Image: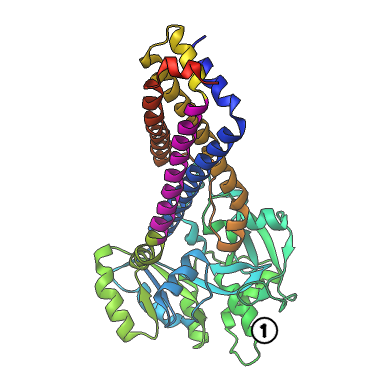
Amino acid sequence: MSDLKLASLYVRARTLITTLTVISVALGLGLAIIVLLMSHQTQALLTSEVGAWDLVIGAKGSPLQVVLNSLYYMDAPTGNISVDVWRRLERHPAVARILPLNMGDNFFGSPIIGTVPEFFAGREAPSGKSLLAAGTMFTQPFEAVVGAEVARRQRLKLGQEIIGAHGWGQTDDLHPQFPYTVVGVLARTGTSLDRAVYTDYRSVWIIHADHDPHQHQPKGGLEAHHAHEHGHEHAAGPHHEHEEEASHDPYAEVTALLVALRQPAARFGLVDSLNRQEKALAVSPVEEISKLDTTFIAPLRGVLLIVAYLVVLVSVMSILISLYLTIHQRRRDLAILRSLGATRGDIFRLITLEAALISGLGVVLGWLFGHGLTAALAPVILERYGLSVQALQLLPGELTVGFSVWVLGILAGLWPAHNACRLRVAESLQEE
């Protein structure tokens, strides 16, 4: 009989002890894998969203809140800023591209983002295919392009009309007189794009001017809405119209501006000058996300990993204890093996192989547990926090951690194996 078969027989003979030991190893490794998956994908998501923009400009308030709202839709807007800020920055020689965001409405809790088609320039689905999975891009007010998660959750189809509601987060203050028509559906990206509805930025002006009788109505917006009702086309880009609209209405506002600079290093001086000269808050999203990671995410990730490694260490100790205790119970069996010609090296190898089998089973079960629990939690995480977690993604760090746990399990079997080699054959055979 081979050593592997004999070791597996001994492992199966101690079903309860083996099961508990394997589960303890699996829990430690599974927790470590969950922490690695969550932290890696959260960090990747956060950094991917900020890469395209050097500045985010919003109303005065918390810089982090401006970034989380404008790029991740994870917090309420800090307010609005005058469209004049947009107009002046568009002429700034350091600005390569500037896009508006108008917020304040939702569709069953998903934010409705008023912007321009250029907002999607340079973006594509992870597969490399077109960002639009179906339909076309919006070209005028009250045409809507919906993110993949919104379309899935609400079962939206092209040509369907949807009704927005006032406020951030799901509310009952509906705008039934201003329905949106779904003209496009985005491919799944695993980013904040999946969780919102996108429309022409003027739609928000039209709705809220009508919704609030005390707010001045932008003439360009009313004309755009009437033209929409009669099926007339409007220009897709903001740069041809927003200055004329703003000249009609000194109260026209946007929620935020996304700015790409010709020279990224220019953001330091521009942030300082904008914050001094404008009634707005200019923020470098890279710096804010870096602060968030350094201050909150990295320490939390470190604490969770320490807890996971402590659980792994305890489980490895359980391998050592279980094997050590069973050596005494198997003294007679081991003595018989010695009397049949097994050497000390054979006994040492047998016990070590048992440790390898137990830790190996724990590693496999832990990997399945880690990815399985992540897959189960992924919809909840997406719903509550807007983070798309890919449960089946295999990280290089997982292999390192899994191999380390397996090796530690083998090392835990060395002491029991050493004690087994020192058993006295004659005395062990005489024991009842």
Is residue 185 in view? Answer: no
In this orientation, which residue lies closer to the viewer: 21 or 47? 21
The quadrant of the image that shows the C terminus is: top right
The image shows residue 389 at horizontal and vertical percentages of: 53, 50
In this orientation, which residue lies closer to the viewer: 149 or 132? 149
Residue at image coords 67%, 84%: 211
Q: Is residue 320 magenta?
A: yes
The image shows residue 112 at horizontal and vertical percentages of: 60, 68
Instruction: Single out the residue that lies furthest toward the bottom.
Output: 214
Q: Is residue 358 above or below residue 208?
A: above
In this orientation, which residue lies closer to the viewer: 78 or 422? 422
Q: What secondary structure is the stretch in magenta mostly built from?
A: helix
The figure's colour scheme reads rainbow
Name the residue type under label 1.
Answer: His
Instruction: Single out the residue that lies furthest toward the top.
Output: 341
Q: Residues within 10 Å of mark 1 (few under 14, many from 20)?
A: some
Q: Is residue 313 magenta?
A: yes
Q: Is residue 339 left or right of residue 388?
A: left
From which residue to which does the magenta span run? 300-329
Residue at image coords 60%, 89%: 215
Is residue 178 in view? Answer: yes
The image shows residue 265 at horizontal and vertical percentages of: 24, 65
Residue at image coords 40%, 14%: 346
The image shows residue 357 at horizontal and vertical percentages of: 49, 26
Quick one: SS at disc 1?
helix
Q: Is residue 92 left or right of residue 124?
A: left
Q: Is residue 172 above or below residue 97?
A: below
Instruction: Identify the residue position indicated by label 1 in the image.
Output: 211
Q: Is residue 214 left or right of residue 360?
A: right
In this orientation, which residue lies closer to the viewer: 142 or 353? 353
